[in-house]
């Protein structure tokens, strides 16, 4: 059945097309990985810049709040109150870190990497 030249040529072309298909699949996989890595790095960079701006804004707002309370309760007490607020916020983030930070981050990264 496979003895004639026409069938051998068809099988040869089929094998060549299969090799080409495998090559295209590898190229697609590489491009998909590159796209996802670039999107992840872009997301991290945007998050870092926004985080930096938020930290700078919080520093200025903290000083403004402390200096606004200073004439009423004294500057050392005002700075202690601002520090106590930050300690409370830190403790809340530490206690609820799984629900506030880890789970949303895992969902974001998983959604980014598993997106078709």
Image (cartoon, grey):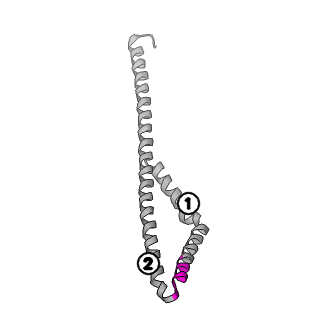
Label 2, label 1: how far apart the Cα atoms are: 32 Å
- Return the mark for residue 102: 1
Tally of numbered discs: 2
| Residues at discs 2 and 1 in contact (Cβ within 8 Å) | no
Q: Nearer the viewer, residue 67 or 32?
A: 67
Residue 109 location (% of width, % of height): 49, 53
Residue density around tag 1, few if under 14, some if 14–19, many if 20 or more, within 10 Å? few
- Give above or below for 11 relative to 76: above
- Bounds of the magenta segment: 73-82
The residue that appears at 46% across and 80% down in the rendered structure is 65
Q: Nearer the viewer, residue 72 or 15?
A: 72
Taking 38 as reference, is 107 left or right? Answer: right
The residue that appears at 45% across and 62% down in the rendered structure is 51
Q: Nearer the viewer, residue 79 or 111?
A: 79
Indicate which disc, 2 or 1, sits on the residue closer to the N terminus.
2
> SS class of the residue under badge 1?
helix
- Give above or below for 4 relative to 111: above
The residue that appears at 43% across and 22% down in the rendered structure is 15
Residue 42 location (% of width, % of height): 41, 51
- Return the mark for residue 114: none
Residue 81 location (% of width, % of height): 54, 80
26 inside magenta stretch: no
Residue 34 location (% of width, % of height): 43, 42
Taking 90 as reference, is 23 left or right? Answer: left
Tell me the mark number nearer the camera, choosing from 2 and 1: 2
Q: Quadrant of residue 87?
A: bottom right
Q: Nearer the viewer, residue 5 or 44?
A: 44
- Give above or below for 83 relative to 7: below
Residue density around tag 2, few if under 14, some if 14–19, many if 20 or more, within 10 Å? few
Q: Which residue is mark 2?
A: 64
The residue that appears at 43% across and 72% down in the rendered structure is 60
């Amino acid at each position: 059945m496979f003895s004639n030249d026409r069938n051998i040529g068809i099988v040869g072309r089929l094998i060549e097309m299969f090799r080409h298909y495998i090559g295209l699949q590898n190229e697609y996989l590489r491009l998909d990985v590159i796209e996802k890595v670039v999107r992840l790095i872009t997301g991290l960079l945007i998050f870092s810049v926004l985080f930096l701006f938020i930290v700078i804004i919080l520093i200025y707002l903290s000083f403004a709040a402390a200096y606004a309370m200073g004439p009423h309760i004294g500057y050392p007490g005002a700075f202690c109150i601002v520090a106590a607020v930050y300690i409370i916020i830190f403790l809340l983030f530490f206690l609820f870190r799984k629900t506030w930070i880890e789970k949303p981050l895992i969902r974001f990264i998983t959604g980014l990497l598993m997106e078709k």
